Image: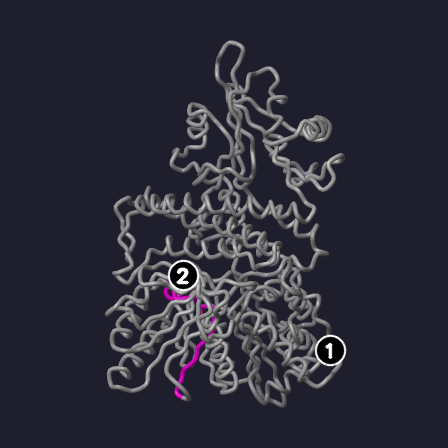
Amino acid sequence: MGQTGFDNRELSWLKFNERVLEKAEEESVPLCERLFFLSVFESNQDEFFMVRVGAWIDLERADPQIRENKTHMTPREQLEAIALRVRQLEKRREQTYLRLTGLLAGQGLRLVDCSRLTSGEEAVLKEYFQREIRPLLSPQVVGKRQPFPFLNGGCLYVAVNLETRGGNGKLGLIACFSRFFKRLLAIDGLPGCYVLAEELILQYAPSVFENYRVKGRALIRITRNADMDLEECGEEGDYRKAMEKLLRRRGRRRPVRMELKGNLPSGALSVLCRYLEIGKEEVYDCQTPRDLSFFEDIRHFLQKKRELFYPRFLPQSALDGGSGREIRKKLEERDVLLSYPYESIRPFLQILEEAASDPEVVSIKITLYRLAKDSKIVDILTQAAENGKEVLALLELGARFDEENNIEWSRRLQEAGCRVLYGLEGRKVHCKLCLITARRGGRICYLTQLGTGNYNERTAGQYTDLSYITAGEAVGEEVSRIFNHLCLGETPSGCRRLLTAPCGLQERLLAQIEIQRAAARAGRPAYIGMKMNALSDKRIICALMQAAKDGVPIDLLVRGNCCLVGGIPGRTDRIRVISIVGRFLEHSRLYFFGCGEERTVYMGSADLMTRNTLRRVEVLLPVLDAVCRKRLWDLFVVLLSDNQNSWEQQCDGVYRRREVKEGETPLDAQAYFCRMARERRAALPEKKSVAHTELV
């Protein structure tokens, strides 16, 4: 696979999640952060099955002979390769779980293993179960008059193989969740000990089915296909209501995986699979608890032990101006670049807050993809509308797993008098644009913001993203044109400066690659550097390969899946692929073409996947401000130099942890950026400013 220069998208993504797992295994990472990485690994796996595996199962049913366009695997071959790799990763996940929970005991917090109880623990737990848990359970024996119930995806159940007095087999089920008891239980009489509710229910399930003989029992958890076709919402009628209906249907889609912890006889397992309409190849045996969301409770219990966490860091003020008006004056002199989470999102919020009440501001237009649960952005937009401003919010209802949140925000924005659009038919609007239009001194003025990440104050403290703010007239006019296209239900096109998808972005990036290729062939300096979350667009991959063969040095910082394999002698040996997984989620997208003063720099929200380049509305901004351009290049160079949280892809497609070489200085790029942000803040003149602690 590696020698062709291509890697499989799904298997490459699993390599990324393996790197997340390695962070949980890393002894130098504080314990509570290792718990976090392990829970992220598992939630990533869940989403992978819900979306990617679900999509391949659907595709196999529709066209089993179709082949993926890079490694030419059929859907069945894909699914089998995924299953093999997932089972291998599960063994490491279980070992890591046991290691971490063992370390928790050293912190005075013990998770009780119900399969290894002392007689004293047995007495306490059994009495607790009978008193606190059993009265709240609703067990069921499946039969002719008790049909197999609907099992919620992601929820835990106990499945029990029962034998009647007459020798007949039955299947029993108990839901292990209730709003009347917590999942992580502190038990009186066992100080410092905690037990998971589902483990307790599994342990004492025989007492629930006291009129049967229990022949086997297990905890089960199913994952349902969540890959939705938004075209099912139809062309006519209320799109929001159609989306709500589609979401209800998603929760009832076919299972794509069943995780099983315990022991069920083969016959009982076959019965369970038949009811769920899945094959035994879709059953994954597990030896440790599923759904590690309870780790967040443990982190909360231990929050006072700061040595178990990364050192505290608050996003720093990037500007010495204390008001939106002062920031606006600076923007009239030069563009502003904010780098999250090292710098605070507050200056952007201040600009919006001032615009909401500025009598000269005519309108605020913004694209919204994912929002915080308690969004300050929405508060400001609703205030602006109530102040008589024209507020246009293009809210993407199809943002996966944020659909319900966005539906609620759309209602609130409409009720406040904002004009709400739901995007374009057949295309998600993924670009991150905000345009403030004002009439000052008889002329139209623009403030434009373009970001690499969402308008989400919470993730601005957790993801590395970039926010570019400019008062440039040319950029403002083009962004205004983009919003006009969107308002008319049209795909944006015709921009000279901005690169827009699906009309032109891919072709113009290919043209930039070709310019560097031609320079290398002519013996002139050439270079390509890219930072993104994923790379799978085959046309761009092939162009990069050809440029490398012609002598162009290429550096790719790709956090997640990368379908290009670098380092292959004579083919991609000039291409270096690096992935960084650290304290913060690397999320910004940057594209560099050329060297020195001739270097062209683009930033935006577009990864180089065909869904971004050809099937979504995306925008890349050419960074013209010399100071900002240099700062972005310096950022890229530091990330390339990281030797603490980075992995380098080998010519066989395997990623190996980069180590400090002889003569090198250890460099954690994210820790370096934290330090630089503090130093820049300390160098600013002291002015009264708003505290930023509420944004962390």
Residue 524 is one of the magenta-drawn residues: no
Of the 4 image quadrants, the one containing the C terminus is bottom right
**Residue displayed at 44% across by 47% down:** 89
Location of mark 1 (residue): 689
Packing grade of label 1 (10 A; few <14, some 14-19, many >=20) is few
The answer to whether 334 is drawn above or below residue 82 in the figure is: below
Amino acid type, label 1: Ser
Of the 4 image quadrants, the one containing the N terminus is bottom left
Given residues 606 and 78, the one toward you in this image is 78
Give the magenta range: 598-618
- Looking at this view, name the residue that lies furthest to the top: 166
Helix, strand or loop at label 2? It is strand
Name which of mark 1 and mark 2 comes first in the sequence: 2
In this image, 2 relative to 442: left or right? left
Residue 382 in sight in this render: no
Location of mark 2 (residue): 656
Amino acid type, label 2: Arg
Given residues 432 and 493, the one toward you in this image is 432
Given residues 499 and 242, the one toward you in this image is 499
Residue 205 placed where, x, y %?
60, 25
The answer for how far apart the CA atoms under marks 1 and 2 are is 45 Å
Packing grade of label 2 (10 A; few <14, some 14-19, many >=20) is some
Residue 526 placed where, x, y %?
33, 82
- Which is more foreground, mark 1 or mark 2? 2
**Residue displayed at 51% across by 9% down:** 166
In this image, 352 relative to 37: left or right? right
